[in-house]
Image (cartoon, grey):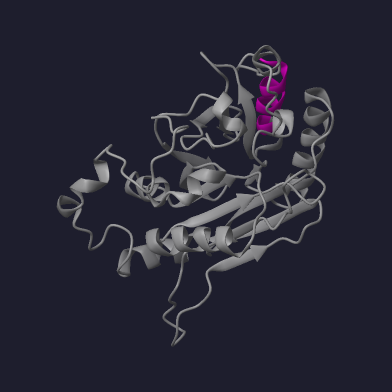
Amino acid sequence: MNQNLKVALMQLLPEKSIEENLLKGIDYCRKAKEMGADIALFPEMWSVGYDIPEDLDQLKSISIDESSDFIIAFKNLAKELNMAIGLTYLETYEPLPRNTLMLIDRQGCDALKYAKVHTCDFGEECRLTPGDDFYVTELDTTIGLVKIGSMICYDREMPESARILMLKGAEIILVPNACPMEINRISQLRGRAYENMVGIATVNYPKGQPDCNGHSTAFDGIAYKPTENASRDTLIIEADESEGIFMAEFPLEEIRNYREREVHGNAYRHPQKYKLLISERVEAPFIRTDYRK
């Protein structure tokens, strides 16, 4: 019998300290497990509630590394609950901290660590160190192995982010987020799922968090079904603005069968003709003084 991969979109308001975020996160992970989740996914930089102080000493003081009580507690919890956790945090790094997701598997081990590549250098993320690559892992779940990748918020606006994850084998892409989700940003995610034939799960902070409005989403990437005559919206779920857990269920076997027969993804690409895409040259009107490589 086909089973769905269940991703709990943890659309939660942060508290006032990392200790409070730890306790709230643990509580909601337990609730997600009770709801049948295979993966619990937090919004962007949950450890600090997406807080990026201007003072660099203060910024560094609130960052954490893998030996922190915060991360160890979630690793222990993942093992206890037999559930993977997509944990987001401000990571200690030199010269400046990073915006990071750690996917903890159900044995409590680090399955994937990804630092946001496309930092918002036009804003407060100019005070963070960008990541340097995208990664895919084969995650052991109760319904079998699933190839999981991740991108974070603004990464979504670069088609290359999801594309390279597809090329590395991702079936499902996890996307922590912290910004207003409106028709254009949601449409970007719909497009990334469609063109790469992948499932995409995005979790945002709810209304009440500055510059956020909920509307966490999930897309299964299946535009055409043999039983239907026309294309379909690939949207699985769209949350409202409220705080809570919203469950996205990905039909893995359908997604895999679809990817084997349809025309998108890497089926008919001509990468030998795309050499300009790897050029680092930037010309007007796209020149920005705050751009970092």
Q: Residue at x 54, y 62 (%)?
A: 219
Residue 261 vertical position relative to residue 24 in the rendered view, above or below: below
Classify residue 4 by image quadrant. Answer: bottom right
Q: Is residue 61 above or below residue 198?
A: above
Q: Is residue 223 magenta?
A: no
Is residue 232 rendered to the left or right of residue 180? left
With 130 as the anchor, is 28 left or right in this view? Answer: right
| Quadrant (top left/top right/bottom left/bottom right) for the C terminus | top left
Magenta stretch in the rendered image: 68-79
- In the visual, does 229 lie left or right of 101? left
Residue 27: x %, y % from top left: 82, 37
- Measured as percent of width and height from the top left, residue 269 is found at 23, 59
Which of the 4 image quarters holds residue 135? top left
- In front here: 127 or 235? 127
Residue in front for this viewpoint, 91 or 288: 288
Which percent across, then down, holds residue 288? Answer: 43, 38
Front-lying residue, 205 or 111: 205
Residue at the far left: name it: 272
